[in-house]
Image (spheres, rainbow, N blue to C red):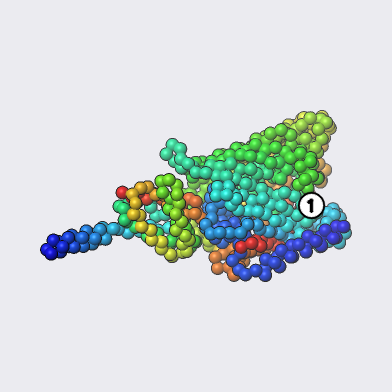
Amino acid sequence: MRNIFILAGAFLAVTVSSAAFAADTEITQADQTFSQEAVTLKAGDSINFTNKDSVTHNIKVLNASGDAEDKGLQKPGEVIHEKFDKAGEFKIRCAIHPKMKMTVTVQ
Amino acid sequence: MNNSKTFFATAALAGMFIVSSSQTAQALPSFAMQTGQPCQACHVGAFGPQLKPFGRDFKLYGYVNSDEKPHQLPIAAMFYTSLTHTKQDQAAGQNPMALFGDAGNRENNNLELDQASIYYAGRITPTVGGFMQITYDGVGNQFNLDNTDIRHSFEGSAFGKDYVAGFTFNNSPTMADLWNSTPIWGFPYNGSSVAPGPVASTLIDAGQQSKVVGVGGYMMYNDWVYLEGDVYKGLGAKVMQLVERPNMGDTYPGAIPYAKIAIQHDIKHNYFELGAYGLSSGVYPGGDLSHGRNKYTDLALDANYQYTGDLEHNMISAHSTLIHEHQNLDASFAAGNSSNPSDNLNTFRADVSYSRNDTWIPTVQVFQTWGSQDALHWGTSTGSASPNSRGYVAELAYVPLGKPDSFINWGNARLALQYTGYTEFDGTHTGAANNNTIYLNLWIAFTPFR
C-alpha cells in the first residue's frame, strides 16, 4: 500500500514538473517578418505566433523531409498556438508572404 | 462591319460585367483571390502595375503564393476607356474604329474604348505561375496576345546565403523585371492611343512588346543582388498573323540577348534599387530583307526609391531610367532611308508619386529623348532632322476600392486625369505645346470567378 502511494507521488511529481518545464515561446509577425529568425525548444514546448500586422498571414510548418503542415490563415490580432513534440529541425513559413521564414530546432 | 464588331465587343464586355456584378461578394481579381489579400497588399495605389515589396516578392517567387484555400480558375478581365483632348485639333479619321466616334476619330475630344483584356493570372502548379493576357485594342480594332510572363521558381542557398531563382517565358524585354523604372511597367501606366506622340523611341523602350518571345533565367541572391538573362526571338510573319498583329513594321532576325543586373536594399524603411540592363537586336526595317539588317544595341541604367515605413497610408515612390541606343543602320543606309550609316538615340525619364491611403495618387514625370541628326531616318512629324523631344506628365489617380474594408473585393477601378505637356516635339520647340494632351481615363478590373 505504501509503495502505491510512493509510485503515485512520483508519477504526480514527474507530470507536474513536465508541465512546469514545458514552455511557451512568443513570436510575433510584424512588417511581414517573424520576430526571431531561429529559436531552440525542448520537445513538448510550444510557440505562440501572434499576428501584429494589418494583413492576414499563414503558418506552415515544414519538417526536415519537406513535408508541410498547414496551420491555416491568421487574421490580424489572431494567435496560433503550435506545440512541438518531436525533436528535429522545422522551418516555419507564411504561404502568402514568401520572405517570412524562421527555423525551430527541437531538442 | 466595323459597327457590328464594335457592338459585339461592347455587348460582350457589358455581359461579363453584368454576370460578374450579379454574383455575391467574395470574388477578387485573380491574384488577390489566390492570396486572399486586397489589391493594396501588392500594388501602390491599390491598382496598376506599380509594385510594393510584397508585389515584387510575389512576382519573384513565380506568382504561386496562396492562402492555400481551394480556388476556381484564375481568370480575370480588364478594360479601360478614355476621353482625349489635344490642344490643337488632329486630322480626323486616322483611326478606322473609334468606339464612340462617327466615321473614324473626330478631330478632337475622342471617347475611346482603349483596351479590353481577358487574362489567366495565377498559380498553374505549386511552383509554376504567371499571367497571359489577350487584348482587344479598341483603337486599332484588333485582338492580340498581350503581356505574358510564365515562370517557375525555386529556392536554395549558396555560400551561406539564401537565393530565389527561376525560369521565365515572356514576350518582351523588361517584362520579367520586378521594378517600375524599366519600360514595360513604367509610368505612365496607360496613355492615349489617339494623341500625337514623339516618333523616336529606343528599341528596348517597349519597341518589341508582344513582337518577340523569349526564355530566361533569374536569381535574387541574399535579397541583395538580382541577375537576369533572357534570349528572345522575333515572331515570324505567320505567327504575327496568328496573334493578329498584321501591321508589324520592323521584324527581328536572329537571337536577341537581354540582361539585367541590379542591387537592392532597404535601409530603415527607405528602399533603394540600382540597376543596369540592355539588349542587342538585329532589325529588318519595315520587314524588308532586301538590304540586309540593321543592328541596335541598347544599354541602360535604372533606379528606384520607395519609402516603406507606412505602406498602406503614406508611400512615396520614385523611378528613373536612362537609355542609350547605338543604331548600326547598314540596311537603312543602303536603301537610302537614313542619312548616316549609324545613329544614336537616348532617353531619360524620372517620376515621383505619392500614394495617400492607396486612394489618391498624384504623380509627376519629366522625360527627354535626344539623338543624332538624321533627316531620312527618323521621319519626324515636323520634318526636322532631329529626334529630340522633351516634356512632362502630371497625373492624379483615384482608386476607391482594393482595400481590406472595400465593399466589394472581386473588382477594382481607377479613375485618372493625366496631362502631358511638351516643350520640344520631334525636333522643334515651335508649336510643341500644340500636342499637349488631357487624358481622362477609367480603368476597371474584375474577376468573374471567386
Q: Is residue B20 above or below residue B55?
A: below
Please tell me which residue is depicted at 67% across the width and 68% down the height of the picture: B21
Q: Quadrant of residue A10 in the image?
A: bottom left
Packing grade of label 1 (10 A; few <14, some 14-19, many >=20) is some
Q: Quadrant of residue B408 in the image?
A: bottom right
Please tell me which residue is depicted at 69% across the width and 58% down the height of the picture: B78
Q: Quadrant of residue B5 in the image?
A: bottom right
A78 relative position to B340: left or right: left
Please tell me which residue is depicted at 33% across the width and 49% down the height of the picture: A87
Farthest residue to the left: give it: A2
Is there any visible trace of residue B121 in the rendered image?
yes
B298 relative position to B246: left or right: left
B317 relative position to A51: left or right: right
Mark 1 residue element: strand
Please tell me which residue is depicted at 44% across the width and 58% down the height of the picture: A71
Foreground residue, B401 or A1? A1
Foreground residue, B305 or B117? B117
Foreground residue, B358 or B431? B358
Residue B22 placed where, x, y %? 67, 70
B93 relative position to A73: left or right: right
What quarter of the picture does the N terminus of chain A occupy?
bottom left
Q: What's the chain of the residue with tag 1?
A: B
Residue B328 placed where, x, y %? 73, 31
Give the residue type at disc 1: Gln
Residue B168 placed where, x, y %? 61, 43
Q: Which residue is mark 1?
A: B142
Is there any visible trace of residue B372 in the rendered image?
no
Residue B410 placed where, x, y %? 62, 64
Farthest residue to the front: give it: A1
